[in-house]
Amino acid sequence: MVARTAAARKTVWTAPPQRESPVAFAVLFLYGSPLITTMNKVHTVQGQPVDARRVAEALGDRSVVLIGMMGAGKSSVGKRLAAKLGVPFVDADAEIEAGARLTIAEIFDRFGEPYFRDGERRVIARLLKSGPQVLATGGGAFMNAQTRDNIAAHGLSIWLKPDVEVLLARVRRKSNRPLLKTADPEQTLRRLLEERSPTYALADITIESREGPHEEVVETALERLAQALGCAGQPAPLARRKIEVPLGPRAYSILIGAGLMDEAGAEIAKLAPGARCAIVTDAHVAPLYLERVEASLTRAGFRAVSIVCPPGESSKSYGEFARVSDALLAAAIERRDVVIALGGGVMGDLAGFCAASLRRGVRFVQIPTTLLAQVDSSVGGKTGINSSHGKNLVGAFHQPSLVLADTSSLDTLSEREFRAGYAEVVKYGLIGDRAFFEFLERRWRAVFAGGPERVEAIAKSCAAKARVVAADETEHGERALLNLGHTFGHAFERLTGYDSERLVHGEGVAVGIAAAFRFSRFLGLCSGQEAARVEAHLEAAGLPTRIGDIAGLRAGEDEILAAMRQDKKVSRGRLTFILAKAIGESFIARDVDEANVAEFLREELERRPD
Ligand SMILES: NC(=O)c1ccc[n+]([C@@H]2O[C@H](COP(=O)([O-])OP(=O)(O)OC[C@H]3O[C@@H](n4cnc5c(N)ncnc54)[C@H](O)[C@@H]3O)[C@@H](O)[C@H]2O)c1
């Protein structure tokens, strides 16, 4: 987000551009736009539902550009429309004023109209490169032929055409319009309207309105956009999804949706009626969600004990494994009972390994509460703890009987942890689903904000993982594809001492994924554009992509190579990489020449800032 916005704000106006305040960035980062929660309201087109999400999806990275006279309501309508679509609202006049550090009236006074028009044309051209968005333009902007062509190339135009009396009334209330500083402003407005209307009429959509609430204009705009984009009447996305992991006798379901935690008892009762339950969670998650899960189990008639571990990677230890196992034995948990992992990947791996070894295998349910755990670690049955020799070196394959991914639990996750998990989501698109990657490019803000896009992205990720796991449960072949970015990423994690202050796992994966694409380009396997596109998306979502982005990592290429050799994916001394021919076309390269890796790393490190 930060990088994308910064890139999009390259100076085209003469004065230095002004950047959003950190608070505005934070709000936009977290919520996409301040009113995003209303974005899925359903309207109707001739009796058929119009879903704002479908309109936004069909829009892709194009912008909706509002044109028309001053006082037509472009800003008020634009803000509301943007909120419904879940895209940013941008006011071209405000951008110009911020860039020039002068009001429009002052620019007119000091430099004259032609100077203003030229700057306006350049600012709009720049803004149009940053869609999707709703862009409100000044009254004269659409009169410029180059701007019209640019709008046609990057978006859909809507002429807001209120009744002339309404315009007059609104304009009378504001006296700062430079073009109306005449002896007879009303006459000037009528003349301007007459002159401009034939050009305004070239817009893709015209909305005529009399005085009335802006909401009505917004609803009409949504309906007309849906018609223009051919997505009127399409069904709303499912709020809940179910993915099957088809592993024969070890098959299980992944349920995805908001509020599933409260149904844990009812869902577990379908699998193990009358069982005892033991919830294993950590001290961050316990105060947030333990009571809810316990209450749900009680409602379903279960007796349950809870075991709370310290949060963080240090709990994947022999000590904690022994402590939790003993607590499970003390609670008389037997084979047909259920161990429930409630938390992130650490709790899933630890509780899963305890369940795998306790009485040679106890039933196990995952309630993942981090994005990483929902899209990755809770699915596939890998469980384990760390040893002084390395991460995840002691463990077992033990499939859960059920995964309940409550997407609303991610609302309490730190922004950094959410982003880190998002790297794994992007990974699935890059491995084998270009369309999913393109969906993420368009809709990542909505995934961050929650709602149906989040459910959709998690479901797509789980389905991708389920497919690979079903084909290769114990990682003898294709499952290695899931390690895209991990050979590099694990080396960076090792070199930063697994210090989550400096680098969390998903951030290592993000740098690793970007490096894997750059390495693929280095080897002549994929184009520079593809590698740059991957990097741009990760950066847009606020993830690191360069070795230089990792705090205090001073290692040279030999140390990085040595760290890669210690990865458990090294087979008989040969390095395995997941490389790519293109986005969505990754493959396993088992015999990569170390000399090439060293040369690539040298190049990468040369770009590291001192
Ligand atoms: N088994 C697998 O296939 C697999 C795959 C990938 C990663 N992993 C493992 O997963 C672990 C990383 O998982 P992680 O990133 O989820 O880390 P984590 O479990 O340590 O969770 C990250 C932090 O978020 C907190 N947290 C969890 N849910 C929260 C919520 N809803 N609200 C607020 N805070 C919350 C946790 O207490 C912790 O402090 C690593 O140990 C990694 O090896 C396993």
Image (spheres, helix red, strand yellow):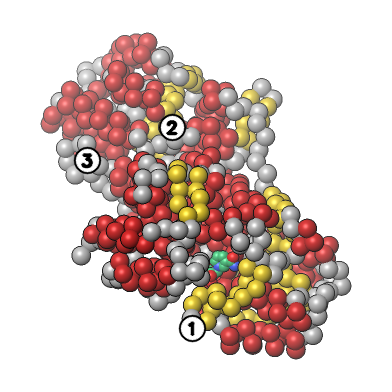
* Amino acid type indicated by mark 3: Thr
The reply to whether residue 52 is visible in this rendering is no
Looking at the rendered structure, the secondary structure element under dot 3 is loop
Q: Secondary structure at mark 1?
A: loop
CA gap, disc 1 to disc 3? 51 Å
Residue 11, numbered circle: 3
Of labels 2 and 1, earlier in sequence is: 2
Q: Nearer the viewer, residue 297 or 168?
A: 297
How many numbered tags mark residues here? 3
Where residue 275 appears, as percent x and y from the top left, is: 83, 74
The residue nearer to you, when weighing 291 against 313, is 313
The disc at residue 62 is 2
Q: On the image, numbered disc 1 is attached to which residue? A: 388
For the point 30% across and 31% down, the residue is 124
Q: Residues within 10 Å of mark 2 (few under 14, many from 20)?
A: many
Residue 239's spot in the image, x, y percent? Answer: 67, 47
Which amino acid, by three-letter code, is at mark 2?
Arg
Q: Amino acid at mark 1?
A: Ser
Q: Residues within 10 Å of mark 3 (few under 14, many from 20)?
A: some
Q: Nearer the viewer, residue 230 or 604?
A: 604
Give x and y (percent) for residue 76.
Answer: 43, 35
Instruction: State the residue in front, 192 or 134.
Output: 134
